[in-house]
Amino acid sequence: MRILIIGSGGREHALAWKIAQSPLVDKLYAAPGSDGMADLAEPVIVDSNSMEALAEWAQENKIDIAVAGSEVYLSLGITDIFARRGVAVFGPSYQAARLEGSKVFAKRFMNRHQIPTANFEVFDSPTKAKDYIRSANRPLVIKADGLAAGKGVIVTETAEEAIRAVEQIMEKRIYGDAGKVLVIEERLYGEEVSLLAVSDGTNILPLIPAQDHKRIFEGDQGPNTGGMGAYAPASVLTTELLARVEEEVLKPVIRGMESEGYPYVGILYAGLMITESGPKVIEFNVRFGDPETQVILPLLRTDLIEVMQAALNKNLDHLTLEWKTGAAACVVMASEGYPESYEVGKEITGLENVDNLQNLLVFHAGTKRKREKWRTAGGRVLNLVGLGLNLEEALKKAYQAADEIKFAGAQYRRDIGWRELERKNNKSSK
């Protein structure tokens, strides 16, 4: 089979790493790809911002399955555009991708299908949004309706903070047109967990739960990022809670999509808050999570191409996923200043020191190789994934690598997995 990965980040590098292991794959391409994954996937010289150009290239090169990494491609309708040329994309249609592309669509869809989520209101006027905030008298979450690279959500404590968030998003347009319309919702309290599942339009197959660390600073402080680290499996989603999420969230989404005329095929990502009253949906994503993918795929024993084929052929009910024992932990090394403004081109040293470390994977998120030297080329630069019999072992390996790798202004959190470790310590002390 001939496979095309669309994207260039750490998630796409992890996908290339996993897909390259499949005996079903004869040739693996990446558009645009990256220097970091060039030994796994041949870079494609085509305008990766043009869906039509990508589709034409895929048709001419007889691609069997294309895998869209970013939500941007799916929200632009890449699945539909490729389908017109007879090329399958593992990912939902333009209509179904609105679950992530529009917060307003997602919240109203959840209401229509009785999927548990926070109470909310929608505003297209900053004045009305501010009036609502002043009358609400409780902590709120302010969300840009459109895509904002994982950063369009501001969690607030006070009315003043919420009003500033409205001004930033709607008036100053820090997220561009994504902030023309706002969702304002009640703030949920509890512990977050990410549950990704594969869907063939009728059947749903959950992956192992993971936990992402969105905030830039330790202790979950500071602004949201695209993700500063993750670990899997996350025990906060117990067997009992997983069963509830399947019945109350995942299955209603798939049934609802089908009933509304756009069957959902691909990865459905439910960002959940485990509240005192049970799991509630914070958000949906319509693709592999980043950096959750980097800790889920190393634990998946099943051939990922077999999984994608089963979804595309609508026979997911005949597939059982097999998992490795143990845990995986990802530490994201980021540029100084991220998630705000940052400089690129900083020389990276020490990668050669971790090349031969066992139970360590290095996925390149934002790097370039120039004259045999690695340099930074993004906000999130490297994903260091440790594997172990337990989370402690996995984290030790990831941080061992982080201590070896250097670049000017490098920043990373040293508390990845802190809730899981705290939970284990509390159990052992009882």
Image (cartoon, grey):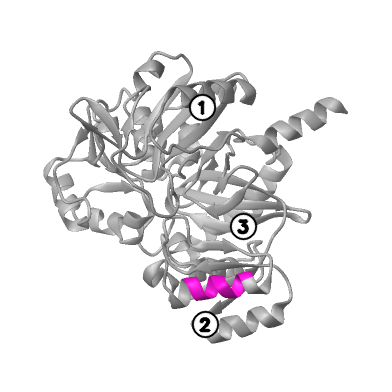
Total numbered labels? 3
Identify which residue is drawn at 70% across, 40% down: 236
Q: Where in the figure is residue 230, as x and y percent of width and height?
A: 54, 37
- Where disc 3 sits, the SS reads strand
Tell which circle, 2 or 3, labels the residue nearer the N-terminal end.
Answer: 2
Comparing labels 2 and 1, the label whose residue is closer to the camera:
2
Residue 63 in view here? yes
Q: Is 428 placed left or right of 334 in the picture?
A: right
Residue 204: within the magenta?
Answer: no
Marks 1 and 3: CB-CB under 8 Å?
Answer: no
Q: Quadrant of residue 238?
A: top right
What secondary structure prevails in the magenta region? Answer: helix
Nearer-the-camera pick, 394 or 69: 394
Q: Residues within 10 Å of mark 3 (few under 14, many from 20)?
A: many
Nearer-the-camera pick, 359 or 55: 359
Give me the disc on residue 299.
1
Mark 3: amino acid: Val
Which residue of the protein is positioned furthest toward the front in this rendering? 408
Residue topped by disc 2: 126
Residue topped by disc 3: 281
Q: Which residues are magenta?
A: 161-168
Identify which residue is drawn at 68% across, 65% down: 157
Which quadrant holds the C terminus? top right
Comparing labels 2 and 3, the label whose residue is closer to the camera:
2
Mark 2: amino acid: Pro
Q: CA distance from mark 2 to mark 3?
A: 25 Å
Q: Where in the figure is residue 251, as x and y percent of width and height?
A: 58, 53
- Where disc 2 sits, the SS reads helix
